[in-house]
Image (cartoon, helix red, strand yellow):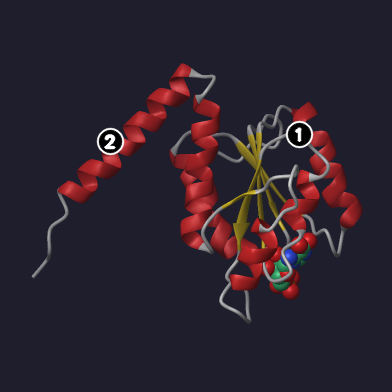
Amino acid sequence: MLNEKNPEVLIIMGSKSDWETMQHCAKTLDNLGIAYDRAIASAHRTPAKAEELARTAEGRGVKVIIAAAGGAAHLAGVLASQTHLPILGVPMKGWALDGLDSLLSTVQMPRGVPVMTFAIGKAGAVNAAVAALQILALSNADRRKTLIEFRERQTQEVLSAKFED
Ligand SMILES: Nc1c(C(=O)O)ncn1[C@@H]1O[C@H](COP(=O)(O)O)[C@@H](O)[C@H]1O
């Protein structure tokens, strides 16, 4: 749920236009019962705000930052340079190269400053939320239960899928 005061996860998007994709991340966090906050900040357009969000996140109790950007997607890497929290990068499909540009500029970090990078677009947005749960589950038994139940539900959904015709 959106919780600006006590978020465990912070979703940072390079632009409001990324929300169309990242709402799927937020919905997944909702379904998993994880409190999150969201913000728009750009390494290019609002570098001071991006830096401030990254620097203050840990002090606010945030444990995982999910960064979404498209095109010259430098946001996740710049955030990673400013915090010790894990950064999960979601490349946006963008407008020109089907998101390959976003993927490469998110994933190709220099050694020592990782960005854990996900699939382009909606699948990556959802998986970043599930990965955030996996990180939280390492130190929390309730989260681990939620994770196992989520995976079990998913398995049952696939096993019980039927064709309409
Ligand atoms: N890649 C970045 C960064 C950044 O990396 O800091 N800031 C904005 N953007 C991206 O530009 C795209 C187009 O943005 P607009 O729709 O606002 O023109 C978005 O996908 C955004 O993430």
Tell me which residue sits at (15%, 48%) in the image.
160
| Vertical side of 42 occupied by 159: above or below | above
The label nearer to you, 1 versus 2, is 1
Q: Total marks drawn?
A: 2
* Amino acid at the residue labelled 2: Glu
Residue 154 is situated, as x and y percent measured from the top left of the image, at: 29, 44
Q: For the view shown, which residue lies furthest in the right direction?
A: 48
Q: Secondary structure at mark 1?
A: loop
- Sequence-first disc among 1 and 2: 1
Residue 45 is situated, as x and y percent measured from the top left of the image, at: 86, 64
| Res 29 seen here | no
Q: Secondary structure at mark 2?
A: helix
Residue 20 is situated, as x and y percent measured from the top left of the image, at: 57, 64
**Which residue is identified by label 2?**
152
Residue 98 is situated, as x and y percent measured from the top left of the image, at: 56, 76
Instruction: Give left or right: position of 1 versus 86.
Output: left
Disc 1 vs disc 2: Cβ atoms closer than 8 Å?
no
Gap between marks 1 and 2, in whole Å? 32 Å
Mark 2 CB near ligand 1 (8 Å cut):
no
Quadrant where the N terminus lies?
A: top right
* Amino acid at the residue labelled 1: His
Q: For the view shown, which residue lies furthest in the left direction?
A: 165
Quadrant where the C terminus lies?
A: bottom left
Characterize the local packing of mark 2: few (<14), some (14-19) or many (20 or more) Cα atoms within 10 angstroms.
Answer: few
**Which residue is identified by label 1?**
84
Q: For the view shown, which residue lies furthest in the bottom direction?
A: 96
Tell me which residue sits at (40%, 29%) in the image.
146
Tell me which residue sits at (67%, 67%) in the image.
70
Tell me which residue sits at (64%, 57%) in the image.
107
Instruction: Give left or right: position of 120 versus 68.
Output: left
In the rendered structure, find residue 131 and report the number of the disc placed on it: none
